[in-house]
Amino acid sequence: MSNIFHAYKDKVGDILNKMAANGDIPQGLDLGRVTVEPPKDASHGDMATNAAMVLSKAAGKNPRQLGEALAGKLKELPEIREVTVAGPGFVNFRLANTEWEVQLQTILTEGIHYGDNKAGGGEKVNVEYVSANPTGPMHAGHVRGAVIGDALANLLKKAGYDVTKEYYFNDAGKQIDVLTQTAYLRYREALGEDIGAIPEGLYPGEYMKDVAQALVARDGKKWIGVAESAWAPVMRDFAVDYIMKMIREDLDLIGIHHDVFSNERVMIEDGTLDICLKELIDKGLVYQGTLPPPMGKEMEDWEPAELTLFRYKQFGHYEEDRPLKKRDGTWAYVMPDIAYHYNKLSRGFTTMINVLGNDHKDYEYRVGPPLSVLSDNKAKLDIVYCGMVKLFKNGEPVKLSKRSGNIITLRELVEEVGAGSVRFFMMTRTPDSELDFDFTKVVEQSKDNPVFYVQYAHARCASVLRNAKEMFPDADLSAAALGKANLARISSADELQLVRFMAGWPRAVEAAAEAHEPHRVAFYLHDLASEFHGFWNKGRDDGTLRFLHENDRELSMARLALVSAVKTVIASGLAVMGVPPVEEMHG
RNA sequence: GUGCCCGUAGCUCAGCUGGAUAGAGCAGGUGCCUUCUAAGCAUCAGGUCGGGGGUUCGAAUCCCUCCGGGCACGCCA
């Protein structure tokens, strides 16, 4: 709840308002573009504001002049110890050390909740991710989106949104028919029938044998020799339930638990699709019409047919309108997706985030226009696209092929490298970029491996605290106690730099949440770890910079407060990413 | 053909939604372990941010246009 940059932005704003009241600058200037940020180069100061440059035109003064005026006022604040005007008109300033002491205390007081903020204002947000259809276990390809979605949801919670983690699956389409057929075949097999090879088009995976075994255990041979209309719904429901349970177990392995599971069948059966369609008709965006034959394909016996069409064309993304129902009267693929978002609307969500693979690029064009119509333009749909993951072992690509059944499952991934490493590594790139996932690198214990590098910093903090316990057995080393240490002893440039960097954590959370980019947390932690490792090594060259000094308990406690804060901020970031922090490295 | 994403150090990638001298890791050069974990740190070298125009106090970032790469474009799901 304490973003020091916001606090100083307010102070700058107050000064500008006073200057306006005094007639130094015009009244009613728009301060919307004024920022207070850490300068790119730390040597410029602790904070920098662009106010003079942004306001110079409207104020009718040149930026340097205006900057000097602002600087003069800032200098009067006791909590600011140095102000300079630089470059094109940046006003740079440094804070009194006491300000950083307060920050340090804040971190220790707020603990893992440091960085929480209210940017979201309690707004309801629906984050939909994974949403794999129940046709098989989770595989490596699903993991990227799963991890990014989960971390994004955590991030938004931290930023003050009311987040629902949601999973949607299709349990009514053709894929499910195929699943049903496969299940029945395996069911007969489980009862002793020789079924030969699994026919092309059905699911060949071994897990379908488990499904069949479980059904035999429940129902015996009850479904042999009965009509398909009798066994089909049973096979279907049993297989879907069984596989969804498998998927949930897989997700549990990487610590992912959704709040809500939604499915297509329910919406078809309870009439949501019909109601939704009617609504779209009432809004005047649906009509009966015909489409030209598909381009680029020679179609024999092409006959135009009347279809239920949505006016996609007027939204600019498609050349033709697209059908909501097929010529045979059944729902087109888009319709359940549209109805599902209609359902989200009815549950009070206007902000909806979907985490999807890069291969679903036109999702927002299919669902977006109907959704804006249904919500009178109130709905905000943001699609976070995830790039493909390429698997490597010892630098060699791992060949995957669906045909040969050579897929790597989520379970294998987790068992080989560990859940925490999988999660962290998946966020070491921007979401939409391709990611090389190297099994060897992920477990490597070197700074080349960002997971290790960050965990090592955390473990070093823990190590110092352990050593402190031996050196000062009677001392209370809890965060609360350390916060009461004489923090004025934190005074070297290197120590203050560490505090300054940590003071940027709330800012990083806010920015990452707003951009829907959880990978920024991974980068922030890497940078923080780097600052910490750097300071650690300075203690090797210069003994006075070491954390623990047996003959100076006061200094030791102040430095332990710093160490505890670093540990806390790293843990806070890892919590967002869903990665358990490590207390001790071993191996 | 249309739409979206990308092009930044030799390689893999960041770049805080328009800020100051464009950053990190790997690879290469040079240093640092009797001291809290050297599983690390410091330092040097490496760049016309794909090309060209535009917007403004200011562009890797926004707009246009070329070049080059990736993905998606059914009355499939």
Image (tube, coloured by chain):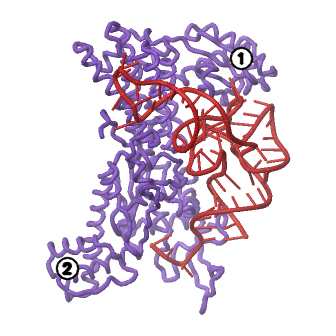
Chain colours: A purple, B red
Image position of A585 (left or right of A317) = left
Name the residue nearer the viewer: A517 or A311: A517
- Tell me how far mark 2 sits from mark 1, CA to CA: 80 Å
Question: For the residue marked with disc 2, what is the amino acid?
Answer: Ala
Q: Earlier in the sequence, mark 2 or mark 1?
A: 1
Residue A204 percent coordinates (x, y): 34, 76
Image position of B71 (left or right of A235) = right
Residue at (59%, 15%) from the top-left corner?
A: A94
Residue A165 percent coordinates (x, y): 39, 50
Name the quadrant containing residue A89: top right
Vertical comparison of A396 with A223: above or below: above
Vertical comparison of A497 with B16: above or below: above
Image position of A289 (left or right of A506) = right
Which residue carries the number 2 mark? A190
Name the residue nearer the viewer: A539 or A469: A539
Task: Give me the chain letter of mark 2.
Answer: A
Residue at (55%, 75%) from the top-left corner?
A: A308
Which residue carries the number 1 mark? A85
- Is residue A156 visible in the rendered structure shown here? no
Residue at (28%, 80%) from the top-left corner?
A: A232
